Amino acid sequence: MISLKKGLTLLLLVIVNVLFAQETITLSGTITDANSNETLIGVNIIFPELQTGTNTNEYGFYSISLPKGAYKIQISYLGYTTITETVTFSEDNIINYKLAESSETLNEIVIKQDVEKLNIKKPQMSVNALSINTIKQMPVVLGEVDVIKSITLLPGVTNAGEGSSGFNVRGGAVDQNLILLDEATIFNSSHLFGFFSVFNPDAIKDIKLYKGGIPAKYGGRVSSVLDIYQKDGNSNEFHMNGGIGIVSSRLLAEGPIKKGKGSFLFGGRSSYAHLFLPLFDIDNIAYFYDLNTKLSYRFNDNNSIYLSGYFGRDVFNISDSFENTYGNAVVNFRWNHLFSDKLFSNMSLIYSDYYYGLNLNFVEFDWDSGIQNFNFKYDLKHYISTNFKLDYGINSIYYKFNPGEIKPSSATSGINPFKLTDKYAFENAVYIDAEHKISNTLALSYGLRLSSFLRLGQNELNIYENDNPLVFNEELQIYEKAEPIDTERFDRSEVIKSFANLEPRLSLAYQINDNVSIKASYNRMTQYLHLLSNTTSPTPLDVWTPSGKYVKPQLLDQVAIGYFRTFKDNRYSLEVESFYKTIKNRIDYTDGADLIANNAIEQVILNGRARAYGLEILLKKNEGKFKGWLAYTLSKSEQQTEGRTPAETGINNGEWYNTAFDKTHDISLTGSYQLNDKWTFNSNFLFQTGQPTTFPNGQYEYNGITIPNYESRNSSRLPAYHRIDISATYNPNPESTKRWKGEWVFGIYNLYNRRNAASISFGENRMTGANEATRLAIFGIIPSVSYNFKF
């Protein structure tokens, strides 16, 4: 007993001695652009002698604990002059740094960072970041810079082809991606049915795509998170920039509200090809426009507020008899508060609205649908020590779903008003995430998210015998809608169904040497919202529905392991990752399911499961006149819906089948070559295995009608997809000191005019009476030219 007391006393003395010997101070502050006062994300703050460092968060704030003493500090950021100085630290210090741009060429955006380089030390994996500068240099269709199409050049990311909306990540569906713009949810990320994205590149500051190892602060989707932040605006002086293209133009203005403290940013973009259609006697109209805005004000070192918004609309009109309008509207008020040099907080109040409307003049009725949500977030980042940081917070979202409403558009209309039942839900979460450096070779990131979902009361809910809205006809071997035996009514404050889920997250990085590390991660995530779509690509008419009595939330489990290596001082990098994920309660649709204007959607859906697995390789050249990457993905994505009883066939006879977004091989090669100060050349090459589809394999006649018989679901494929794009950027006066700077961008999309199949349809040739297949191709070769400017 005495020896035990002595041992404990000695241990206590050792701990106290270590604590006093390692007495530390805290250095914190904000890092901004010297010209615009824009906060910079991901700036590196390094102390070479201590072999330690940190970087700035999403709001430009940093904090690090150090032993007392004099040390050399290095602050570096791509495109900016590095600050190197020796500072003596004897007490807690707040030091704000301003970085000056190292060059002034137009194609180097004011906010530009080294986000694309690999960090082998951090446990974060399955994350890709692209700078806006890189995205703007990529050749694109019609010269329109596109954030969504750019990320499809990364490993593990595809889409359903040309003219398709959204993107697929690691074999996941489009609705399984959480898309955030300044923390607000974007439900439809495309303009003109998928030809362009809703994100104005001039207004974007930072882009990150999480495919796995997703931090606990994110939730609500089971495939990926695309997190996009808008610029704050220049608080020192007024500037404008924009571009004029073949089909659209854009203009962005930014400047100070109060110099050095407050700023504004307003950006607009619109297409105008429809203005020329009447010259060719074409009555149809298709155009889009969007607006970005942001107001920022810094009261003092401890308090800043931001008010940001986005509004976008698409309009499609056919001869004044059919008009389709849809788009997103979001508003976000944020307050950054610094409690201490180690505790940073961000509070957000967010409103998001996705609207879809139809005006059918030829039948004299209007159709409206959409989804609204009100979101409260409070996040805190706690810099406990150099080796240990905590993120924690809460999140509450209130949803209103409008599945659809029909209203007569004139007094003579024969249509009766009809309203599908509105749905309401409340989603809540609390989370904590830790980043823990165990040693010089081992770092961990681990966290837990507790989410809950309350399906709130609605005017009417069907009741079915044995709670079964779908019955199986054994004689015909098909699923049929069950007849409701009654209905229930609920007050808005009542809870129809509630769910709660624990979502653990874990990532680790083991550094073998200065250039090599091995990383692994595990994710569990829950998705309570479902996109009702049985097409390969979502359309604006697709409707979202919440989990409830008959629809279960989707549950994901994903593991990944990777090998990461840098070469020649990080000029080259190699990332190799393998992943496996399973999803429970993935919605599947009965054959011939009707999803539009269906007030009892539970009658045509079944709960199945999905799985995806694959290998991703990313080889990058990060520096030099020639830069670029080679991305390759080998993957499999499948879905299965078994029968609920031995007598039922399920979907596809209960067997696994390819999802519509399964691509066995996906290769992309992206390159940029700077010939001199005036000319830069860029190119992309893409190859993807053809998209799965279902073809007819026979036909029969019934009462004189020819009826096709189809093969197993998604057992065939479209032809392989491939193309080459090239572009050249010309800066006529790179050394000009004038405020006005301009550049020309020349591009060719689909250089060798590949007619990639968007779909293949089957029909009877009217001349010969023989069956034939018809390939639909969206694009051939498309040249483009655009002019970009700033002043």
Image: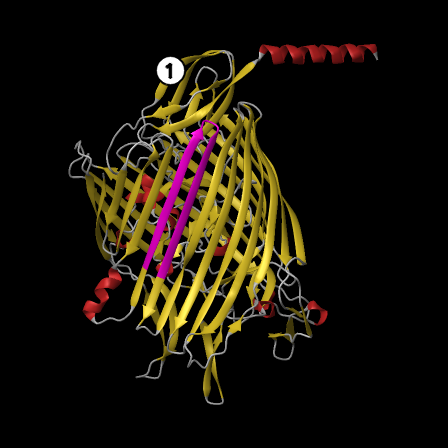
Choose between 718 and 426: the one closer to the eye: 426
Which image quadrant for residue 497? bottom right
Choose between 328 and 5: the one closer to the eye: 328
Looking at this view, name the residue that lies furthest to the bottom: 703
Choose between 147 and 426: the one closer to the eye: 426
Instruction: Indicate whether 423 appears above or below 386.
Output: below
| Identity of the residue drawn at 39% across and 47% down | 151
Which image quadrant for residue 326? bottom left
Residue 585 seen: no
Q: Report the quarter where the C terminus lies.
A: top left
Q: Is residue 1 magenta?
A: no
Q: Give the range drawn in magenta.
A: 288-314
Instruction: Indicate whether 232 appears above or below 158.
Output: above
Residue 732 seen: yes
Residue 49 x/y as whole percent? 45, 14
Residue 198 x/y as whole percent? 37, 52
Instruction: Indicate whether 61 appears above or below 93.
Output: below
Report the amino acid beneath label 1. Answer: Glu
Q: Does the magenta stretch include residue 295?
A: yes
Residue 196 x/y as whole percent? 34, 55
| Identity of the residue drawn at 79% across and 12% down | 5
Instruction: Indicate whether 401 appears above or below 294.
Output: below
Q: Is the magenta stretch mostly helix, strand or loop?
A: strand
Compared across the picture, whether 673 is left or right of 178 comes to left
Residue 244 x/y as whole percent? 23, 50
Other residues around mark 1 within 10 Å, as few (<14) / some (14–19) / many (≥20): few
Q: How many labels does the image show?
A: 1
Where is mark 1, residue-wise? 85
| Identity of the residue drawn at 50% across and 22% down | 64
